[in-house]
Image: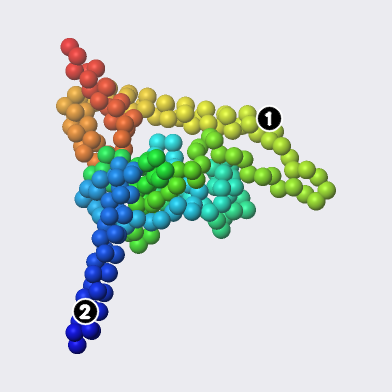
Amino acid sequence: MSGNHDHDHDDDLDIDDIVDSFFDARKAIFEHVGYVEDWCVLPIDDSRDQFWSVDADERSWVKFSPSREALAYWLEHDDFGPHGDKLYENVIYTQCHLPKWIYRGEELTIVVADTQTDGNKCLQLFRNSNEVRLGEAPKAEPVRGPDRDGPEDHPLNQAIEHMIETDRKAHADNLIAKVRTMCAQALLADLRAAITVHRAICHQPNCPVLAAMEETAAAAAVP
């Protein structure tokens, strides 16, 4: 009886050590990237073997793949091409209690992610060395036929891409200009009330709409 009891006691100590190691490791990961839990306790998803990229503002999406070429193709063409079975995307979970949603350490990065599946949210853990940055993504190898080399990018295609990007920026600028016009036409009291509501429900850092509203209100308040 005594021998069995000692054996059970040893097992309890072993599992305690395992639990302690788990929480110690979790704490060390958070300290490495500078993440501090607030409100939600989220599981860690180990994506260190994935290549990954986030949108330029780091608040919309994280795309990832086991293939660098597949991810580079997606980023460059905004299309899966032949790589649809190797490409994945999560929404960045803009949890309002956190000051940011991308936490970069010296070697690892945590992305606060919403899988958009069954309400599952997680802390997606990536290697910094596997990040593929927007605008720096290496081009995918062209598909080459058996008897000829694959085509190089054509200047016309480059011009079209530049035009599309310029148009996107112009559209955003036009939208903010329209916001300013609408705000200037509103009563100052109504504008201030709208700003209070917008600030309370908008989780977007450096929101350009909120900034336009506040600037318009400040200008209107000047005698």
Rendered residue at 24%/48% (across/down): 37
User: Where's the C terminus, which quadrant?
Assistant: top left
Q: Residue furthest right?
A: 147
Whole-percent x, y for residue 124 in the image: 38, 52
Location of mark 1 (residue) = 155
Residue 157 lies in quadrant: top right
Per the image, label 2 sits on a secondary structure element best described as helix
- Classify residue 193 as left or right of residue 68: left
User: Is 209 situated above or below 60?
Assistant: above
Q: Dot 2, how many residues are within 10 Å of its Cα: few (below 14), some (14-19), or many (20+)?
A: few
Whole-percent x, y for residue 221 in the image: 19, 18
User: Is 12 situated above or below 27?
Assistant: below
Rendered residue at 71%/37% (across/down): 152
> Which comes before the other along the chain, label 1 or label 2?
2
The amino acid type of the residue labelled 2 equals Asp
Residue 96 lies in quadrant: top left
User: Where's the N terminus, which quadrant?
Assistant: bottom left
Location of mark 2 (residue) = 6
Q: Dot 1, how many residues are within 10 Å of its Cα: few (below 14), some (14-19), or many (20+)?
A: few
The amino acid type of the residue labelled 1 equals Pro
- Classify residue 157 as left or right of residue 148: left
User: Is 194 situated above or below 215?
Assistant: below
Q: Nearer the viewer, residue 213 or 165?
A: 165
Disc 1 and disc 2 in contact, CB within 8 angstroms: no
| Mark closer to the observer (1, 2) | 2
Rendered residue at 56%/51% (across/down): 67
Q: Nearer the viewer, residue 185 or 75?
A: 75
Q: Does the rendering let one see residue 121?
A: no
